Image (cartoon, rainbow, N blue to C red):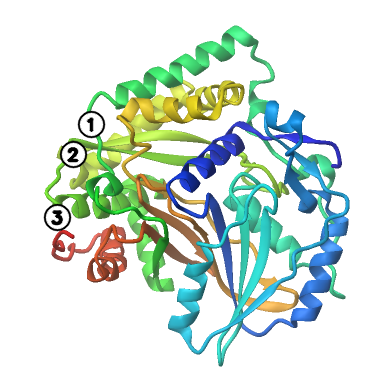
Amino acid sequence: MTSPVLLGGIDFFHLMNDRAMRSRGQAGNHCLHVLELDGRLDMARLAARLERATRALPELRFRLDDSLLGRAGRPRWVVDHHRRAPVPRLHEVSGEREGAARVEALLAERVGGERPWAIDVVRGAGGGDVLVFRHFHALTDARGADRLVAWLGSGGDDAPEDPPRGEERYGAPERLLAAHDRDARLALARTYKAHALALGGAPILSLARACPGVRPAVSRVVRLVLSAEETRAFDLRVRRLARLSESSLMVIAATRLADRALVARGFAPPHHVIPLPLSLDPKAGARRLFGNHLTMVLLSLRRDELYDDARAVARLAEQQRAAVRERLDLAMIAALDLARWLPGPVVRWLGEQPFAGELASLIVSNPGAVTADRFAGVPVRSAYPLPAVVAPPGFQVIYSRSGGRLSASIVYGDGLLRPDEAAAMPGALRAELLGEPAPPAGGGV
């Protein structure tokens, strides 16, 4: 793929988010894909591997078109034929805590349209390396990044195996609109607008807006990793309560954490609105590496049902059935497809209009199991995606699985939670996921 590629609707959404985040003092809208390895990498051989991969895969030489045509029209990727692979950086740390802090600090280092990806290696005094793939969110989503990292680490002789075919590598949700004419697309976009405005009929409040004196320029992270036994207990609870919809229990658990933080600050919003990304990749056999190939549904949980498991699960199931019935997943794609033709400030205003300047109450994502089990011949002990926090809302929970164990990254804006409050959140999330009594709520800032 060497010709220019227009950004898809969700790619464009993330590009607009990047500009908004930078205007608020953040580094931008980017993500990490973290591999904890059971061994050490040879940095010279890693650099050679990345160079060969960049020559084999033109998309690794993407940059946003900054020409007059590129700036005046719809944003697009172009291939820089002279670009070489970024040199992987080595960060040596003294222990596990310093290593975790170094990974967190990488969320403050920008990758963007000019240089949309990079690789760092964090190395402690003992144990294995931590490989961190940093990518611009407009380049790919969590599932695409997972496959891309797995491909970069595949094969032998310091080179990955043959990449997927060009037509398999890039995905954009707009292909689902191919059979719809202009009037049908406009009707779908109006459906999505009406849905968002209806949810905005009752006010919401994010953690970022509940702390008006805080300007969270940096992302902070606390992690929860369930044991294999705890993961099995969670899966049994999913089958018993949610009819195999694990995302429902994940959304409820994360929303309760955010709600308790708001209540501790003296706020009790009538409901919470949570965007939930839904991948459009096939269940099996997907080989896509680039593009945000997904849609999103907006879910709402009222205060009077949030802490009742049965009612909350039923409410989410009802909304997901309605989303299918009203084609809200396709409606969002149509709305974003139209938005790509509008100026950036107009797009941001439209996105915030339904919720009085808020984007959502919090963000929840569940991209699923990480696929890589080795990288350049070194076994992978565990792996997870880690996005920079979007503030507002300033609080997000990202779930994933690696080696059969469920984990979650709780990402929040610096200063929005007290240190003791943040430290207690993994335990509180574990209790919610496993259906155990919740710990006492912490105090406000």
Is disc 3 surrounded by few (<14), some (14 to 19) or many (20+) residues within 10 Å? some
* Total numbered labels: 3
The x and y percentages for residue 194 are 38, 17
Q: Which residue is mark 2?
A: 269
Location of the N terminus by quadrant is top right
Q: Earlier in the sequence, mark 1 or mark 3?
A: 1
As helix, strand or loop, the secondary structure at mark 2 comes to: loop
At 35% from the left and 35% from the top, the residue drawn is 299
Q: Which mark is residue 264?
A: 3
Amino acid beneath label 1: Pro
Q: Earlier in the sequence, mark 2 or mark 3?
A: 3
Residue 291's place in the image compared with 30, above or below, is above
Location of the C terminus by quadrant is bottom left
**Spatial distance from mark 1 to mark 3, Cα to Cα?**
18 Å
Q: Is residue 324 left or right of residue 159?
A: left
Q: Which residue is mark 1?
A: 203
User: Marks 2 and 1: CB-CB under 8 Å?
Assistant: yes
Q: Taking the image as drawn, is residue 444 in sight?
A: yes
Which residue of the protein is positioned furthest toward the front in this rendering? Answer: 68
Q: Earlier in the sequence, mark 2 or mark 1?
A: 1
The x and y percentages for residue 324 are 46, 26
**Spatial distance from mark 2 to mark 1, Cα to Cα?**
7 Å
